[in-house]
Image: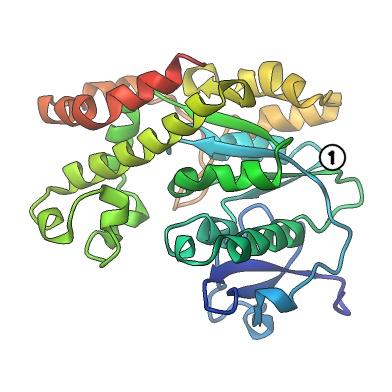
Amino acid sequence: MPDDDRLFMPVRAAPSGDGGTFLLRPVTADNFLFGLHGRPPAEHPDTAQVRQVRVVDHAPSGTVLPPLLSIWHLTRCGSTLTARMLSRIASLQVTDEPGAVVDICGAFWSLVPQDRRMAALRTAVRSIGQRIAPEARHLVIKQSLRSSRDVDLFTILYPDMRRLLLIRDPLEILVSNLKGPPGWLKLRDAVWSPLLSGIGLAAQRDLSDGEFIARCLGRAFTAMADMVETDPAGWLVIDYADLPQAVITRLLPHLGILPTEAELAAMQEETRLKAWSRSGRTAFRDDRAEKHAAVTPEIRALCDRFLREPWQRMARFA
């Protein structure tokens, strides 16, 4: 362990012929929840300590927590709120879409031999699971929707790990992504973007942003529905409309966790603010009615064409 007692954890993972490389940065309790997304800004004090190592040469230096729960979602449906709420439970070490795990479960790593890919994922999870707070007992990982095609990698490695899927009215999801375009929209001209949309690059260039987003979401929704239907008993499916109370009344009992009064109060405090905002956290306001008011015939048609059917397949398990 480094002299300042900070642990180094992977924030990105790049595939290679010899099994891949990790980008490591120092992590503390203060930046663990949202600090594993990638390289820090150039002016950040941790930048000088960022290092790149081969996956086979990296091993955790701290006590490793067992993974308890993976959080899956359809985007814009309360997963960040859920992660924030769970992070207020002292026994849980929670991280939100850690970059290395998202990378390894993504398209490029499918080109790596399966045994090396699984070894890299196991090492990444063990490294991220290094205990930060003395009271932490279990690791919780929030996944990216982009990883849904390879959720079985987690199932193979951790068959006893609980799986939560958060869903939401697909019209609300689509409107949210159209009003606040996702970062991956910038990738629509990348040579590998057909892996997101399911159609050729030339055909993609003629699509509106709305249809590109709907196609990508629909493809990911379908992969997620396939996974849930393969093992419905292995999933707890919660609808956004039942948040935040369902985290306390359904998820915590499902995990066998009885929170203290102080933890419950801290979880409740999280619900009063927006879970995420580019301009900083502000008071939460339920805008579902506004989202439905913004639905146009074109948006409804895109939803019905690409999202409705896979969403219905998942909603029947909620």
The quadrant where residue 248 appears: top right
| Crowd tier of the residue under label 1, counting other residues whose Cα lies within 10 Å: few below 14, some 14–19, many 20 or above | some
The percent position of residue 249, horizontal first and vertical second, equals 69, 16
The quadrant where residue 224 appears: top left
The quadrant where residue 149 appears: top left
Disc 1, SS? loop
The percent position of residue 14, horizontal first and vertical second, equals 52, 72
**Outermost residue to the left:** 206
The percent position of residue 30, horizontal first and vertical second, equals 73, 58
Tell me which residue sits at (24%, 32%) in the image: 306
Q: Against 235, is 38 above or below? A: below
Q: Is residue 155 left or right of residue 171?
A: right
Tell me which residue sits at (51%, 16%) in the image: 317
Residue 48 appears in the rendering: yes
Tell me which residue sits at (11%, 60%) in the image: 202
Tell me which residue sits at (45%, 14%) in the image: 316
Q: Is residue 87 left or right of residue 283?
A: right
- Badge 1 amino acid: Ser
